[in-house]
Image (tube, rainbow, N blue to C red):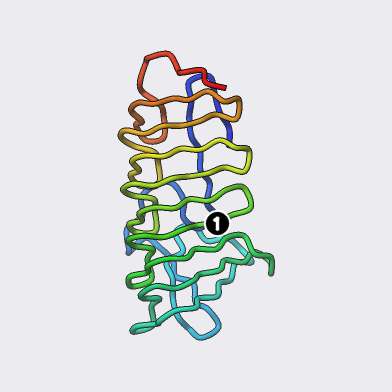
């Protein structure tokens, strides 16, 4: 996770990515049983395994979604799905970090916490996959930023609290 002089938080999730997508713009990916999940930015060699209910051909309800790239696990989502979209509460685990919180249209939306494997984290408001609104971020260097975020960028001009 890059931390820049004016802190920015970049959370890359290959299947829950930044930006907005409409249902008519998204592609769908099916598991071995034919249950579909929204695939906002598809990649060659992707596959999924959905362990949960399938309603009218789409992942629905609470379950576990495992994403693979060329046969290797790249992410695990555990939480609520509605008509093939991550909606409500959920947890996304990837090799570089974990997001736990609210989802809408398979993007982080609402309140949530992202913990990166380098020790940095962001906790607060999210919109369309970005930190957006009030939140706090701890950098890998131990600097704590608290304030307002706008589409993933720290907007508060106050000096950071340099706690170690």
Seen in the image, is 49 located left or right of residue 150?
A: right
Within the image, what quadrant is residue 105 found in? bottom left
In front of the other: 43 or 118: 118
The residue tagged 1 is: 93
Q: In the rendered view, would you say 7 is above or below 26? A: above
Between residue 100 and residue 75, name the one nearer to us: 100
Q: Residue furthest right?
A: 71
- In the picture, residue 4 is in which quadrant? top right
- Residue located 30% across and 35% down the image: 133
Q: Is residue 36 above or below residue 125?
A: below
What x and y, as percent, mark residue 122?
A: 46, 37
Question: Which one is nearer the viewer's eye here, 17 or 154?
Answer: 154
Label 1 secondary element: strand
What residue is shown at x 35% (from left), y 54% (from top)?
Answer: 102
Question: What quarter of the picture does the C terminus occupy?
Answer: top right
Query: Which residue does the image show at 58% across and 32% down from the upper left?
Result: 2
Q: Specify the quadrant of the image occupied by residue 47.
A: bottom right
**Which residue occupies 44% across, 79% down?**
52
Extreme front residue here? 164
- Residue 118 in the image, given as x and y percentages of width and height: 63, 38
**What quarter of the picture does the N terminus occupy?**
top right
Is 144 placed left or right of 21 in the picture? right
Q: Position of residue 87 (x, y in %)?
A: 34, 62
Q: Name the spot of residue 64 as percent of width and height, x first.
A: 49, 71
Number of callouts: 1
Task: For label 1, count other residues whose C-alpha is less than 10 Å away and answer few (under 14), some (14-19) or many (20+).
Answer: some
């Amino acid at each position: 996770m890059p931390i820049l002089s004016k802190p920015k938080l970049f959370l890359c999730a290959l299947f829950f990515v930044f930006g907005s997508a409409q249902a008519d713009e998204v592609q769908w990916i099916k598991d071995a049983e034919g249950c579909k999940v929204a695939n906002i930015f598809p990649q060659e060699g992707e596959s999924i395994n959905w362990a949960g209910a399938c309603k009218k051909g789409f992942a629905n309800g609470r379950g576990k979604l495992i994403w693979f790239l060329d046969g290797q696990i790249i992410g695990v989502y555990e939480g609520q799905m509605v008509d093939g979209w991550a909606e409500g509460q959920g947890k996304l685990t990837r090799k570089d970090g974990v997001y736990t919180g609210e989802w809408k249209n398979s993007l982080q939306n609402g309140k949530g916490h992202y913990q990166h494997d380098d020790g940095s984290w962001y906790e607060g408001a999210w919109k369309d996959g970005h930190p957006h609104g009030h939140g706090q971020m701890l950098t890998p260097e131990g600097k704590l930023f608290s304030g307002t975020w706008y589409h993933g960028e720290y907007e508060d001009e106050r000096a950071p609290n340099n706690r170690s």
